[in-house]
């Protein structure tokens, strides 16, 4: 798509301006940024610091590493392992099926109805899903769900013969694919749109097949954005709370639900700050995923040029 | 051309399989929410949405919040971001970092730090659910920042601002009469995204004990699954309409620019 708007000047104003707009800003110029910085300082930086600092304090406010070392023990460690497994599994499933769906959409008409519907629906499920998704699942494969009843009455299969799987890890995995696949579509579509038809034509005119195109052109180009999307999906599932909270009301198989336990009062005396340490653990895992992604894209930006 | 046929078949299979996978729950929701007694159909769940006072109150809260959060987001971001491009490039990196920071801090973690903060907020502003505006403005920052940043990058802000200034416009006039109209599509996009996000938010509202739409839906589900499922279906469809409309907002701009 060509940009029709006038070409932008370099952002950040590195150009020398004769009007004197750049140069050293006056003290008054800084004032404009104050409301934003103050707001973000109070409502984003302060709570974040509170969590980070609290992880290193005992209930009297003295420095301790006990909270953090507890993360590597018992139920808390298990929850982290389970959270990471759940996120990795749903990220892989979401990335594969999402990439296929993205491809099916991208080869169609760019202004077509199909693409519009899929993109809008993906946006809804990926960012808005939350609680409604949990109820969608209860309606479908819950104890009295449509599919459960159909299978029970007409096929003779009891979905819940083994256990209440919907409210445990397998159920969460299934539900999570419903926002992971759509997120993949949103993240991956720009990459697929970036494949130029000329490359395909060049491949064909040189006698290449569909296989050689994907093996030598499409594949290598799409690998970095695919891996980037995979990491993003992982971080997304790892941070997700609403769907799991609405579905699982008892027990805390994953880290976000354990933090809920700390916030709603199931706190053992002397462990008030353990919830914060769990939060710090989550931030670290998410930051690693995002950091690897940044490194990956930076490397790619170097050799694409 | 065998590969074209193969591609078409593969595409149809993917769309069909995933289409069913995603549409089945919607059908199930419609079916579940219209169940009556003794295998009859009934719209009871749907009609009782309106009768449920708690639910209606929560819906009003959520709608108000979606407006106040979008407004606060615009008021905070637009002048700051425009100003940074014009006069304070030094702050570019910091502001970008702060705006994208919520992506690295899951809402469930943010709420741990916000809980003590909200004790103060409620002390100063009362315990109205509308105080959630502050938290929600933070949540929408990354999405709003990207939309507005793209909008600002697409116009020649410096030239426009200098032209207006040389004609004697104040900075406020530049912002209100030059910047805002030129990036209105980006602003609409950012606003619609934040509305969708706020209407769907559950984590922070539920853990700070405020009554919003999703909190009520979740609560209701424990008593009457039918109503909760009806509201869930309705809110998914509403968000879909919102984002579907968004896909046309971008396009209309493309067309008008081409006509010009």
Image (cartoon, coloured by chain):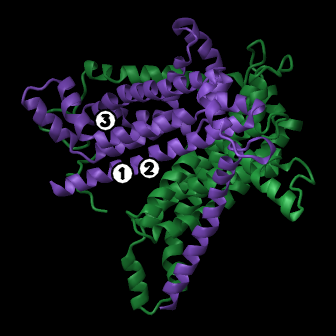
Chain containing mark 3: B
Q: Residue tagged by mark 3?
A: B89
Q: Residue tagged by mark 2?
A: B244
Q: Residues within 10 Å of mark 3 (few under 14, many from 20)?
A: some
Q: Residues within 10 Å of mark 1 (few under 14, many from 20)?
A: few
Q: Residue tagged by mark 1?
A: B248
Q: Choose the circle earlier in sequence order: 2 or 3.
A: 3
Q: Position of residue B51 (x, y in %)?
A: 62, 25
Q: Position of residue B10 (x, y in %)?
A: 58, 77
Per the image, label 1 sits on a secondary structure element best described as helix
Q: Choose the circle earlier in sequence order: 1 or 3.
A: 3
The Cα–Cα distance between marks 2 and 3, rounded to whole angstroms, is 35 Å
Q: Residues within 10 Å of mark 2 (few under 14, many from 20)?
A: some
Q: Colour of chain B?
A: purple
Residue occupying image coordinates x 73% and y 40%: A244
Residue B182 visible to the viewer: yes
Residue occupying image coordinates x 60% and y 16%: B117
Judge from the rendering whether residue A247 lies leftward or rightward of residue B202; answer left or right: right
User: Depth-wise, is mark 2 or mark 3 nearer the camera?
Assistant: 2
């Amino acid at each position: 798509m060509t940009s029709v708007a006038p070409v932008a000047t370099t952002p950040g104003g590195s150009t020398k301006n004769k009007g004197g707009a750049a140069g050293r800003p006056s003290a008054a110029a800084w004032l404009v940024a104050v409301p934003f910085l103050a707001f973000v300082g109070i409502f984003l930086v302060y709570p974040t610091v509170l969590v980070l600092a609290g992880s290193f304090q005992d209930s009297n406010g003295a420095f301790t590493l006990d909270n953090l070392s507890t993360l590597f023990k018992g139920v808390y460690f298990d929850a982290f392992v389970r959270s990471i497994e759940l996120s990795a599994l749903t990220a892989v499933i979401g990335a594969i099926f999402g990439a296929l769906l993205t491809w099916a959409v991208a080869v169609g008409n760019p202004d077509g109805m199909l693409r519009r519907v899929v993109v809008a629906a993906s946006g809804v499920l990926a960012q808005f899903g939350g609680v409604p998704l949990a109820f969608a699942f209860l309606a479908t494969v819950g104890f009295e769900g449509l599919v459960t009843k159909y299978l029970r009455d007409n096929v003779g299969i009891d979905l819940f013969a083994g256990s209440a799987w919907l409210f445990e890890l397998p159920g969460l995995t299934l539900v999570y694919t419903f926002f992971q696949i759509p997120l993949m579509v949103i993240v991956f579509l720009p990459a697929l749109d970036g494949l130029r038809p000329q490359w395909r034509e060049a491949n064909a005119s040189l006698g290449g097949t569909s296989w050689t195109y994907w093996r030598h052109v499409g594949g290598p180009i799409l690998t970095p954005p695919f891996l980037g999307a995979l990491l993003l999906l992982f971080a997304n599932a790892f941070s997700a709370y609403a769907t799991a909270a609405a579905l699982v009301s008892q027990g805390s198989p994953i880290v976000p639900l354990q933090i809920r336990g700390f916030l709603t009062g199931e706190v053992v005396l002397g462990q008030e700050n353990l919830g914060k340490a769990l939060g710090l653990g989550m931030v670290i895992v998410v930051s690693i995923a995002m950091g690897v992604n940044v490194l990956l894209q930076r490397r790619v930006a170097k050799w694409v040029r | 051309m065998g590969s074209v046929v193969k591609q078409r078949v593969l595409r149809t299979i993917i769309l069909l399989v995933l289409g069913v996978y995603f549409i089945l729950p919607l059908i199930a929701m419609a079916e579940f929410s219209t169940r009556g007694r003794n295998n009859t159909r009934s719209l009871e769940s749907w009609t009782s949405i309106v009768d449920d006072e708690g639910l209606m109150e929560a819906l009003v809260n959520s709608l108000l919040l979606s407006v106040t959060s979008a407004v606060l987001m615009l008021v905070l971001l637009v002048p700051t971001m425009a100003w940074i491009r014009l006069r304070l490039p030094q702050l570019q990196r910091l502001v970008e970092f702060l705006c994208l920071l919520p992506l690295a801090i899951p809402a469930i973690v943010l709420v741990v730090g916000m809980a003590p903060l909200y004790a103060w907020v409620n002390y100063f502003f009362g315990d109205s659910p509308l105080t959630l505006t502050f938290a929600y403005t933070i949540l929408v920052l990354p999405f709003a920042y990207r939309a507005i940043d793209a909008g600002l990058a697409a116009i020649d802000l410096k030239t426009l601002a200098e032209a207006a200034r040389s004609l004697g416009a104040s900075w406020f006039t530049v912002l209100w009469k030059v910047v805002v109209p030129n990036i209105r599509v980006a602003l609409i996009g950012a606003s619609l995204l934040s509305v969708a996000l706020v209407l769907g938010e559950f984590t922070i509202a539920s853990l700070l004990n405020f009554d919003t739409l999703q909190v009520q839906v979740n609560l209701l589900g424990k008593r009457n699954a039918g109503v909760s499922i009806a509201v869930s279906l309705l809110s998914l469809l509403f968000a879909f309409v919102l984002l579907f409309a968004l896909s046309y907002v971008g396009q209309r701009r493309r067309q008008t620019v081409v006509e010009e």
